Amino acid sequence: MGIGLDMKFMDFVLKYASGKIDDMPLYQGNDVPYFLRADENKGIKRTNPYKKGVLNAGIKKLFDTLSRDESVGLAGFGMMTGGEVIAEAYNPPYNCRYRHVSFSMCKSVVSMAVGIAEHEGLLKLDEKLVDIFKASNNVFMKKEMKGITIENLLTMQTGICFDEVSSVFTLDWCREYMSSVFCMEPGEGFSYNSLNTYMLAAIIVKRSGKPLMDYLKEKLFDYMEIKDITWDKCPMGIEKGGFGMKLSIIDMLKLGQLYLNYGTWTVNGEEKQLVPRKWLEESTRVHVKLGRDVIDGYGYQIWCLKDGSILFNGVFGQNVYINRDRNLVIATTASAYDIFPDGKIVNYLCDFAGDDKNFINENTLLFTVLDFGNSFISEADKLAKRLYGKISNNQYKNKYRQYFNDYLGVEYKFDEYAGSIIPVMIQGVYSIYSSGITGMSIGFKGSMLYLKVCEENTTYKIMLGYKTEEPYIYQILKIKGKDFPIAASSGIVFDEDSRPLIKIRVIYLEEVGSMTFKLIFSGGRLKLKTLEIPKLKRVAEKLAKEEYIKKREIKLSRKKTLESPEYVKYKINKVLEPVVIGRPDL
């Protein structure tokens, strides 16, 4: 369940840290630039979990466990049984009005499209990739490529070593894929790679003669009243397949329920087979035995778990867990603090489904049922209290003026890299690069608290929540032509020496990413500490090893003295966790 990383990623970090954004790859841009609000109704029924045989107390415990684990970074949570939603909850500031990027979870949606296309006779699983994409065959193609079939793509057994992260550095993903090197012969072993799924998406587009999204709308989404899914495309205009889809918790639950129903959906009062039952059975059985932790193996772009359930899974915590024994679907979205939260979410879901105490049986006492609806309100209150302390609402503005009056409204400028308003990972995904913050100020306009950030030739004014009853301000941040819905908050906190500072969070509601700024004022200066989530620093530091340095020395022999591990680490810290001083007179 991972993503590939190699030297190109480290080159990207070092170029970025050196301010060489003009050298960055600019081949993306086929993402949806406008904000699309999630459909909150979606034609789905909701009911009390007790009526469906599930105890509220168990659901609440599961949600609280996921919420309290910082490494999980839970955003949204939903549960469905018998075709009805029995739980839907969000960690503030996330809510039902926003979708969430899914990453690899959408690989399972590509599998659905392949199953429908096979049933219609548009493709066969034993077809060779080289026969489908003859125009992409070239002199650099390895002989092993001739053995790759559609089924190899489905089971992640192509044997290629193509680095999916580095795909953002290329224009023609299909041609680049066909030039891949191999780690093993096709069919000989499991090698997870998102570009295998991209090639499946490209096959659907080629054989159906229409975009993958149009094909799925016609065959699937329209029948299921799924209206607000978007899917980013590669530079050539093909849906990315293995990542880049945005959808809501309810959309995810519906797709899980479709598989729970063996591919049927009620349309105008009648059951309609949207995905062939034969495909459902074949795609959800183990084709590659793995035996890792809770994982039994891999099917056709779907994980098969040891408890008999199946899983649509994406990095950073996007999951659809489908347990037929319990007639249960659970969906999660998250913005994990770490890139790989060690499979914690899936373990929590399996533990919940495997515990009979969470379900009603002849030994269940009626008085164990709690009111599910109010449990999450109390969690939101707790979060607000942890963030803002015990200051009453009418004291907030006075507190800011008491501690920071001489600094409010003053613009501080930076002469070194000070971080950005947008996380580096999101910059890389959408090719929206920034040379960094050049100026910053915080102040009041009436009763509204704002943060003003200058980057290059653009000024962003972000309104900040700072009251208990309004901890977040929701707004659209337009960055280089793309709409990003965000929620922003601020609070006065104290360091280890009891000195006050302002802590600001800017959360990207539909992405995996947030920025935290700590503003420390002293002696007429601003000390700015920046932290972004996810913590790419951990990944980058793992790559900044002797092996990487040696490769860099061969490639850049003139810079051997600069390419030491210490220098690389310095660069990583500078770009991913900068600490800088701002002055009003620069």
Image (cartoon, rainbow, N blue to C red):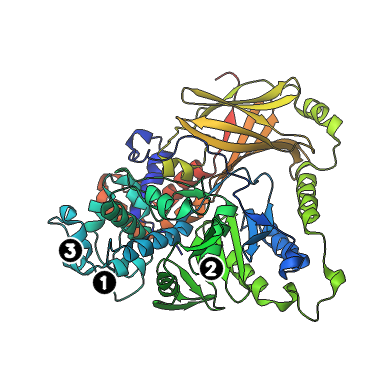
Give whichever of discs 2 and 3 has the lower sequence position: 3
Name the spot of residue 38 as percent of width and height, x first.
57, 43
**Disc 3: CA contacts within 10 A as few (<14), some (14-19) or many (>=20):** some
Horizontally, residue 275 falls left or right of residue 443, namely: left
* Residue closest to the far left: 139
Q: Nearer the viewer, mark 1 or mark 2?
A: 2
Image position of 301 with respect to 22: above or below: below
SS of the residue under disc 3: loop
Task: Measure the C-alpha gap from mark 1 to mark 3.
Answer: 12 Å
SS of the residue under disc 2: loop
Q: Amino acid at mark 3?
A: Lys
Callouts 1 and 3 close, C-beta under 8 Å: no
- The C terminus sits in image quarter: top right
Q: Tell me what residue is drawn at x 51 percent, y 46 percent.
A: 227
Task: Measure the C-alpha gap from mark 2 to mark 3.
Answer: 42 Å
Residue to which mark 1 is pinned: 186
**Disc 1: CA contacts within 10 A as few (<14), some (14-19) or many (>=20):** many
Residue to which mark 3 is pinned: 142
Q: Amino acid at mark 1?
A: Pro
Q: Nearer the viewer, mark 2 or mark 3?
A: 2
Horizontally, residue 321 falls left or right of residue 29, namely: right
Q: Residue 557 or 517: which is nearer the viewer? A: 517
Residue to which mark 2 is pinned: 261
Quadrant in the rendering for residue 338: bottom right
* Residue closest to the far front: 269
Name the spot of residue 176 as percent of width and height, x first.
24, 53
Image position of 59 with respect to 236: above or below: below
Total of numbered circles in the picture? 3
